[in-house]
Image (spheres, grey):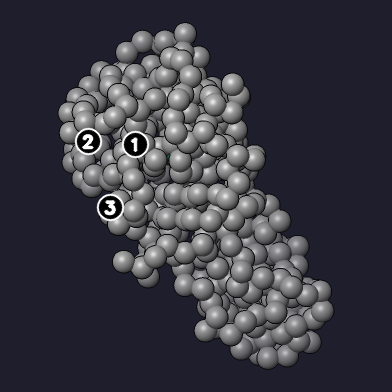
Amino acid sequence: MRPSRELCDDSMEFGKPRSSLPSPHLFVANCGPAVDLELPAIGQAFSAFGPLAQVQLADGTGCRVIVSFHNAVHAQAAKEALHGLPCPNLNNRVLYIQYSSVKKQSKVKEPPLVFEAASETGIPGLQLFKNFVNEDEEQELLAAVDKRPWQVLSKRRVQHYGYEFQYKIRNVDAMQNMGKLPEFTDCIVKKISSLPELLAAEEATLPLDQLTVNEYAPGVGLSPHIDTHSAFEGAIISLSLAGPCIMEFRKYKMDHDSIYSGKEEICEDDAQADATGCPDKHHRGGSQRHPVQCKPVFLPERSLLVLLGEARYGWHHYIPHHKVDYVNGQEVYRKQRRVSFTFRKVRHGPCKCRFASVCDSQRDS
Ligand SMILES: O=C(O)CCC(=O)C(=O)O
Ligand SMILES: [Fe+2]
């Protein structure tokens, strides 16, 4: 097993723009396979300004590239002509260009290892059950939610059952029960509720009484967050349907500062920035800080993710805002949509976990 690395998708280590002085290397943001621009097409567009040495990905996001000319004069001409403007030869995408002091290819950090089995991550309490539902069950669940009204947020659609998750307070009103979970989830709730891992868990999760259904379009993710400790107890359980994604598990150095449970919990409008690829914009939450640990896990469709204990209380989870995930050498395109069913149990009373530095109950008391 390779160790996880610090480099995450939003790192711009390699090819980081360093200098305002002309250089033969251009750091070009909002440009790359993740925004449907392949490297040869990018090369072709830039070669109008002079002979190119190389076009390469700047990092793991797929939407930042380094275009290297042999001659700085040509790079300067390209920058002056293309920066901040829609590029007609590249689907009219607006490119953001800076000079880059590019390093040699050998210094490129490898993309992080993506774990395909939860046990390999070494995160206590993280479990992934592949093919937890079959294709027929998947279709039935999707058809059932599609018959129900969606709440439209700025980047994704959601449905809440049992208790409404309120994005403004990043919590639920535990006094406002909206009724039982819908009948179409009975089978799946029964199957989850008989998992030995949940039955044996230190903190009770059953009965599950809250469900949030999230629908993500390609390129839409979720900011790094820990589900609010004071809102839910026991496990966080998420079923992936219709499409795969990567979910990163992150630890930050100063979790007790601005990044604590609840404070940056999934907001209505949190999925942005990386979808636009603009280097100056970052999605909300902890992405401006570099995590000290970052463990991406590939969640295939029909898999069930269970977060218990440390995985639930101590690690942030994050879905990168990408159209393409790089999974150990393979490009995995996000499908037309990913729909997740997140089952939880609403907490009545404060959280008394041992992760006080990221616990809103203990921080606010
Ligand atoms: O889409 C998912 O699998 C995760 C959703 C999530 O993290 C949440 O609703 O808090
Ligand atoms: Fe979450």
User: Are circles 1 and 3 on residues that touch, CB within 8 Å?
Assistant: no
| Residue 308 sits in quarter | top left
Q: What residue type is labelled 2?
A: Glu
Q: Residue at x 63, y 43 (%)?
A: 284
Q: What residue type is labelled 3?
A: Ser
Q: Which residue is drawn at 43% across and 59% down?
A: 325
Q: Which residue is drawn at 70% across and 76% down?
A: 100
Please tell me which of labels 1 and 3 falls first in the chain: 3
The 10 Å Cα crowd at callout 2, few under 14, some 14 to 19, many 20 or more, is some
Q: What residue type is labelled 1?
A: Leu
Q: Name the residue under label 2.
A: 197
Please tell me which of labels 2 and 3 falls first in the chain: 3
Dot 3: element: helix
Q: Is residue 209 left or right of residue 295?
A: left
- Residue 306 place in picture, x, y as percent: 31, 38
Dot 1: element: loop
- Residue 240 place in picture, x, y as percent: 33, 41
Q: Can residue 39 be seen in this view?
A: no
- Asked if residue 33 is positioned above or below residue 352 in the image, the reply reads below
Q: Is residue 320 left or right of residue 81?
A: left
Q: Measure the alpha-carbon separation of dots 1 and 3.
A: 13 Å
Q: Which sits in the foreground, 279 or 291?
A: 291
Q: Mark 1 points at which residue?
A: 308
User: Are circles 2 and 1 on residues that touch, CB within 8 Å?
Assistant: yes
Quarter of the image with the N terminus is bottom left
Q: Name the residue under label 3.
A: 119
Q: Which sits in the foreground, 104 or 25?
A: 104
